[in-house]
């Protein structure tokens, strides 16, 4: 019924629909650069990789776009512009090596760049006060994480399967609000920042980080941590500060088979 109501907004002009989810409408709007300020949501979920030949600035007129999902969509001309009103950006499988330089993350709550060739998500420190969830899952070219200092409300960080990841920015391991940090299968990761103090962390996954030999020193209370997975790592012992992990209910330290 909701889709029917939206369709009645503009029967003849797809670019004047407030929400776009129909493949044909989206193709028409993006390839002809017919998006307008009326568009608030665009969802294109392709089960397989699909090429979409559109301008690199195809979203430049959609200044009120708040929800953008373009999963498994290939953009041969790249992407040079994203609206700054975005609240959710899901670019799962999209060929982005970095976010457009003009794009501010001020209002983004969810950022998903899983399975993308992202290398440098953004430069410097972004003022993204609203972001709560960030996923770089299986980003095979990501070799270091960005600065998370200003992401004060960040609750979830997914780095699972980033096999070239070698460097974790120290700001991540001192984050006060992050509850989930998943670095499973980061097989190139050899070290972590020296200290960890994550007051809200509930679940820390480091399974199959096969080259990781040392767990950071725990500084201050981490009472919320209930699940810690260190199986299939090269870590053989924890620092004495591990006695501060009084809330652990599940702990896996299965050693790496050699």
Image: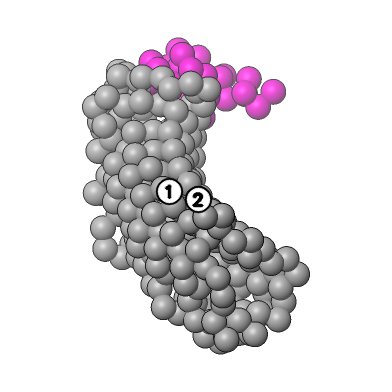
- Return the residue at label 2: 185
| Viewer can see residue 32 | yes
* Measured Cα–Cα span from mark 2 to mark 1: 7 Å
33 vs 160, left or right, is: left
Residue 89 spot, x, y in % from top left: 45, 43
Placement of the N terminus among the 4 image quadrants? top right
Q: Residue 22 magenta-drawn?
A: yes
Res. 162 mark: 1
Q: Are marks 2 and 1 in contact (CB under 8 Å)?
A: yes
Q: Residues within 10 Å of mark 2 (few under 14, many from 20)?
A: many
Instruction: Name above or below for residue 213 compared with residue 239.
Output: above
Please report the residue visible at 44 percent of the width from the left and 28 percent of the height from the top: 72
Q: Residue 98 magenta-drawn?
A: no
Instruction: Name above or below for residue 73 compared with residue 182.
Output: above
Residue 23 spot, x, y in % from top left: 48, 17
Please report the residue visible at 50 percent of the width from the left and 63 percent of the height from the top: 234
Please report the residue visible at 28 percent of the width from the left and 35 percent of the height from the top: 79
Mark with earlier residue (2, 1): 1
Q: Secondary structure at mark 1?
A: loop
Residue 48 spot, x, y in % from top left: 48, 21
56 vs 118, left or right, is: left
* The residue stretch that appears in magenta: 1-29
Q: Nearer the viewer, residue 47 or 52?
A: 47
Res. 223 mark: none
Instruction: Name above or below for residue 140 compared with residue 108.
Output: above
Q: Quadrant of residue 82?
A: top left
Residue 217 spot, x, y in % from top left: 49, 81
Q: Nearer the viewer, residue 157 or 127?
A: 157
| Viewer can see residue 68 | no
74 vs 197, left or right, is: left
Q: Residues within 10 Å of mark 1 (few under 14, many from 20)?
A: many
């Amino acid at each position: 019924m909701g889709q029917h109501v939206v369709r009645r907004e503009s029967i003849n002009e797809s670019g004047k629909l407030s929400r776009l989810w129909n493949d044909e409408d989206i193709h028409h709007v993006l390839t002809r650069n017919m998006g307008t300020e009326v568009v608030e949501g665009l969802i294109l979920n392709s089960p397989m990789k699909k090429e979409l030949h559109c301008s690199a600035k195809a979203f430049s007129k959609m200044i009120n776009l708040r929800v953008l999902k373009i999963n498994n969509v290939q953009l041969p001309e790249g992407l040079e512009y994203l609206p700054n009103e975005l609240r959710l950006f899901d670019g799962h499988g999209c060929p982005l090596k970095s976010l457009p330089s003009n794009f501010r993350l001020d209002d983004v709550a969810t950022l998903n760049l899983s399975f993308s060739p992202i290398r440098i998500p953004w430069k410097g420190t972004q003022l993204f006060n609203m972001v709560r969830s960030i996923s770089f899952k299986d980003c095979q070219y990501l070799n270091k994480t960005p600065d998370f200092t200003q992401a004060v409300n960040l609750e979830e960080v997914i780095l699972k399967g980033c096999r070239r990841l070698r460097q974790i920015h120290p700001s991540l391991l001192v984050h006060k609000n992050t509850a989930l940090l998943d670095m499973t299968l980061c097989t190139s990761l050899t070290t972590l920042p020296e200290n960890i103090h994550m007051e809200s962390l509930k679940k820390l996954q480091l399974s199959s980080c096969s080259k990781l030999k040392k767990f950071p020193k725990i500084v201050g209370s981490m009472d919320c941590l209930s699940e810690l997975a260190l199986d299939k790592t090269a870590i053989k012992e924890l620092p004495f500060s591990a006695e501060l992990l009084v809330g652990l209910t599940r702990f896996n330290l299965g050693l790496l088979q050699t």
